[in-house]
Amino acid sequence: MTRKEIEESYRGLQLHICQALEEIDGQARFIEDPWTREEGGGGYTRTISNGRIFEKGGVAFSAVHGPVSEAMKKQLNLDGEYFFATGVSIVLHPKHPRHPIIHMNVRYFELDNGATYWFGGGIDLTPHYVDRTLAVDFHQQLKETSDQFSEAFYPKFKDWADRYFYLPHREESRGIGGVFFDHLDETCGLTKSQIFEYCMSLGHLFPKAYKHQVDSIQIMEVTEKELNWQAVRRGRYVEFNLLHDRGTKFGIYSGGRTESILMSMPPRANWEYNLELEEGSEEAETLAFLRKTHEFIK
Amino acid sequence: MTRKEIEESYRGLQLHICQALEEIDGQARFIEDPWTREEGGGGYTRTISNGRIFEKGGVAFSAVHGPVSEAMKKQLNLDGEYFFATGVSIVLHPKHPRHPIIHMNVRYFELDNGATYWFGGGIDLTPHYVDRTLAVDFHQQLKETSDQFSEAFYPKFKDWADRYFYLPHREESRGIGGVFFDHLDETCGLTKSQIFEYCMSLGHLFPKAYKHQVDSIQIMEVTEKELNWQAVRRGRYVEFNLLHDRGTKFGIYSGGRTESILMSMPPRANWEYNLELEEGSEEAETLAFLRKTHEFIK
């Protein structure tokens, strides 16, 4: 498993996912921006906007390398001199508030030409309104895919996602979680190729999992109330990504391409001081749901 | 100069500023939320919304104290066991895109009951559209107030603001800057009382400076283009506050009150992937202006 093979597979994964998402949308197409990084490497950022389903989203591939800068050492705790990183990152903001925001990332990281390496990744779902049945379906799909590699993965990575996608200052989860893992190497009991295959399987699951959500949600004409709540939840998404997200931090501090890193930003977000929700409303119920951790699979 | 005196003066300053801002707005009134912090202290958050001039804004006072937590030590580089902090923080998002966003902060910080202390603060202006004459007026006012205390202050603190209110990932200033200072104590040549008086003078200048901007700007009926650009600039404001602002970080990591810390968020912000501006447009000119550092006073 060379870095070149991983890089090429991830680029292929990006193209596969874009095609599948275009089919789901049925209207908008991805545009591709190639870019290069002065210190080494580059990427292809693919974005979609104003679609039937997707209001704004991106599927970014990058493969970057170069010296580990002082900023990276400090901000990212990297113990090495030269890094290589490749990955696919996705955030999709749907137009309709009843459709969920979804995020996926798979990444491979090497320090000092492979002296150390690790994989990271995950998929998580952020519904503006929580549908418990669909939340279970989503977790079930993640469990099935994970179980093919190790039965230890789903429980461990689901907990990891619960901890990672949490906004302490809001005492809220970003959404219903999913799976998240980082620094995964052979010490987990799988070979490097097997971990790589797990990442690829998650990548292939991604469009299927989102299609299942969209196909299962009955859409009515959108209301002002729904749109406002969507904008509030998108505000929380912004808070998470700029305050906490490691991928965003890595991108910013490693001198990545800003437009590619911040393609995760929603098209529109609102903040209201001390927002009050009607008791018993769907919005209040969603918020109450996000304030607890849930086991979706018993 | 006891901490109690400083705390009381800052609370008085908050009330003075709110009254002056209500006069500028001529319509909306501040509402006050008192809050307490479990580990010690609390504050009064005053917010204004849906006014004639101000769409959303806040003038927050707080006086908090308690043990320096591990998170604070790590995130804020604090070398002490017990802290006290009091200050006034203001962010105002005007309704009309031709009116500028403005921010002010004065703060006093003590470690270990005064074993070390310092003042920090500043005022800076973020016009959605830059008017060069009004930018000069703003800096002139800051210089005049600062010169009364030390002629070294304005040049030093203006540069500090240029460096502080900068978004490296965008290669843009947040706005036209102003003054910014931190860790100011007797080593600057002034007594503790004099530094305190400087902070108070900046506080008193604040509503006058904003009134001068509003009074000098001719408002026409707002256009969609202006509103969209305002939402984009507000997006940059969000990026600065969540990625870089020390006050926001201090608040979040010291277990402050989230609604008070994030009252700085705009009511609405937009992000567009790879936004393209019409060559020669006012928006493109503003962006070009923000990509350079300017000396406003020769």
Image (tube, coloured by chain):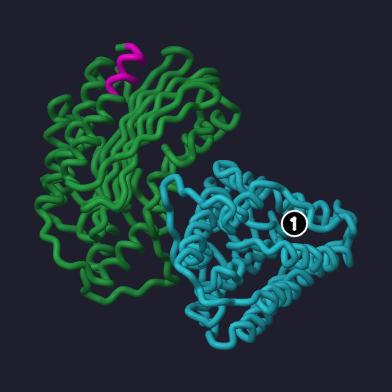
Chain colours: A green, B cyan
**Residue position marked by numbered label 1 in the rendering:** B117
Q: Nearer the viewer, residue B282 or A203?
A: B282
- In the image, is B235 to the left or to the right of A108? right
Q: Is residue A199 magenta?
A: no
From the viewer's perspective, tell me whether residue B244 is left or right of residue B80.
Answer: left
Q: Where, by quadrant of the figure, is residue A280 drawn? A: bottom left
Picture quadrant of residue B115: bottom right
Give the image location of residue B131, x and y in percent. Answer: 68, 64
Residue B34 visible from this viewpoint: no
Quadrant including the C terminus of chain A: top left
Question: Which residue occupies the foreground of this view, A145 or A101?
Answer: A101
- A158 to A292, vertically: above or below: above
In magenta, the rendered stretch is A2-10
Q: Is residue B39 left or right of residue B182?
A: left
Quadrant of residue A274 within the rendered picture: bottom left
Q: x, y (%) of residue B227? A: 48, 66
Residue A173 visible in this rendered orientation of the protein: yes
Residue A79, given in percent of the width and then of the height, sits at 51, 22
